[in-house]
Image (cartoon, coloured by chain):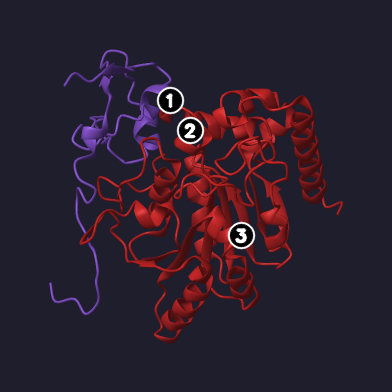
Chain colours: A red, B purple
Amino acid sequence: MAEIPKEEYLEKCTTACAGCTSSLTLRYVLKAAGPDTVLVVPACCTSILQGIYPNTAFNVPVYNIAFAAAAACASGMSEAFASMGKKTNVIVYAGDGGTIDIGIQALSGALERGTDFLYICYDNEAYGNTGMQRSGATPMGARTTTTPGGKTNAKKDLDRIIAAHNIPYQATATPAYPKDLYEKVKTALATPGPSFIHILAPCPPGWRIASDMSVAVGKLAVKTGSWVLWERKYGELSISSPSKGAMKKRAPLRDYLSVQGRFKGISDSTVNELEQAIEKNIAQLAKEEAGEC
Amino acid sequence: MNDPVAMSRPKKGAAGMTGSWRTFRPVVDREACNACGLCAMYCPDGCINEEHEIDLDYCKGCGICAQECPKKAIKMEREER
């Protein structure tokens, strides 16, 4: 791990819950980005975990903005820095609600305009900050406070929506594999034009897991194929090494579901549907990597 | 502090002494530790330094270090207050 810098850009300590993987993600995002970075944060857990005014735990400038406006704000910021001749990194760090549901029009617009920025969606598969209400990212069968019997709709396929914009760099990651995450943020920031990283961030209180299990659950998501790590550079897809092994021999999906309280009592038919969705996704990604579609 | 707009500044302990949240404290067995650094890599709050010493003023006691330690050199012991 010698190449990952020792500098920390988060002061001890944030108000994040114990075992928060969003906090862990942000550590590596900021290590990759360095001090010349501005974070744009819409309403999400990250707007809370900065700390209490007039203090903040974040050692980089942060601009807190309304839910729907993050990507639009970053567009303006990026243009302003460019006109001043500055090479400051503009990073939007948004949750799944602020990306997949509420912020999607501003994001789509910014991607279409070719804004030079990095958009990171850290996905805990619900509105965690307000008490775990369902979002478009909640997977089928997961119990949230607004889907007490388990969600009946499938998770919105954000990555294929983003892919339709044909942006220069797109990737998926999870902080259970910090080196992979670090390298993807580095590559994204080195690529001119818009880039997008979708990060699975297991949430101990929301997913009903013990705080020490959040990293282990992230690894299980990759090993069962529920979360596939890949990157797409200028349209060329490559599956990342942790997922390569998982795709050869997948761990049973039940291993991933049974450790999480939110999937308690999930029906066999829902597990089958999830299993089929995973198989379809993996088959499509494998085809694309082989250049068959 | 004559900021033109309301603005927060970086400070250690912006969220208070988060060590008080802990119900279990991590205790490192130096004999078993092989200094691989995985605990420091996975600590969400960056509370473990290069010497693998844990900052108990801020450690929230999540237990990820103990869970991820390949040598099982970290034990979570109940806090007595």
Q: Circle 1: is it few (<14), some (14-19), or many (20+) Cα within 10 Å?
A: many
| Residue appearing at x 62%, y 75% in the figure | A109
Residue B38 vertical placement versus A240 (above, below): above
Name the chain under label 2.
A
Dot 2 and dot 1 within a common chain: no
Name the residue nearer the viewer: A81 or A126: A126
Name the amino acid, label 2. Answer: Val
User: Mark 3 sits on what residue?
Assistant: A101
- Residue B52, given in percent of the width and then of the height, sits at 27, 29
> Which residue is at 31% across, 41% downward?
B46
What amino acid does circle 3 point to? Answer: Asp
* Place of residue A180 in the rendered image (x, y in percent of width and height, measured from the top left): 53, 44
Seen in the image, is A208 located left or right of residue A271? left
Q: How much space separates mark 2 and mark 1, taking CA atoms? A: 8 Å
The residue labelled by disc 1 is: B68
| Badge 2 element | helix
Q: Quadrant of residue B57?
A: top left
Q: Which residue is mark 2?
A: A215
- Camera sees residue A67: yes
Q: Residue furthest bottom?
A: A83
Crowding at dot 3, Cα within 10 Å, few <14 / some 14-19 / many 20+, comes out as: some
Q: Give the structural element (helix, strand or loop) at label 1.
A: helix
